Image: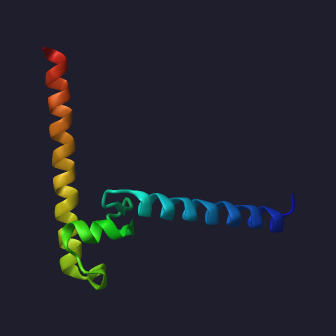
Amino acid sequence: MTLTRELDAARDNLEFDRSLIAAIQEASPDGILVVNDRDVIVSHNQRLFDRFGIAPGDAVAEDALKRADVVLYEAEGARRNRTMLAAGAGMT
């Protein structure tokens, strides 16, 4: 396979992956926020804005990022609570 064909195949795969992610995000009834390993927001859906009352123009505003940080903190706490409850349920 030539380099050009490999690049074309990789581009096609990337385009498919992006389309699939966009479809999943928009079909989801939940707000979705994706951050990378440096805590930079890399993706989100409209329901996230709707759910937390964030205006779309504020997506990169400091206030919106602070709210997103609160959301992540609360989600992590909820996950820890579910894990603790599940562990406790297994002990009885």
Question: Where does the image place residue 71, in percent across and percent down from the top left?
Answer: 20, 61
Q: How is the image coloured?
A: rainbow
Q: How many marks?
A: 0
* Farthest residue, direction bottom: 57
Which quadrant of the rendered structure holds the C terminus? Answer: top left
* Left or right: where 45 falls relative to 76: right
Q: Quadrant of residue 85?
A: top left
Question: Where does the image place residue 88, in percent across and percent down from the top left?
Answer: 13, 23
Residue shown at 21% from the left, 34% from the top:
83
Residue shown at 30% from the left, 78% from the top:
59
Q: Quadrant of residue 54?
A: bottom left
Asked if residue 68 is positioned above or below residue 89 in the image, the reply reads below
Question: Where does the image place residue 21, in percent across and percent down from the top left?
Answer: 50, 60
Q: Quadrant of residue 7?
A: bottom right
Asked if residue 81 is positioned above or below residue 69 in the image, the reply reads above
* Front position in the image: 90 or 53: 53
* Front position in the image: 92 or 47: 47
Question: Where does the image place residue 41, in percent across and percent down from the top left?
Answer: 35, 68
Residue shown at 22% from the left, 58% from the top:
72
Which quadrant of the rendered structure holds the N terminus? Answer: bottom right
* Left or right: where 54 falls relative to 36: left
Residue shown at 26% from the left, 82% from the top:
58
* Farthest residue, direction top: 92
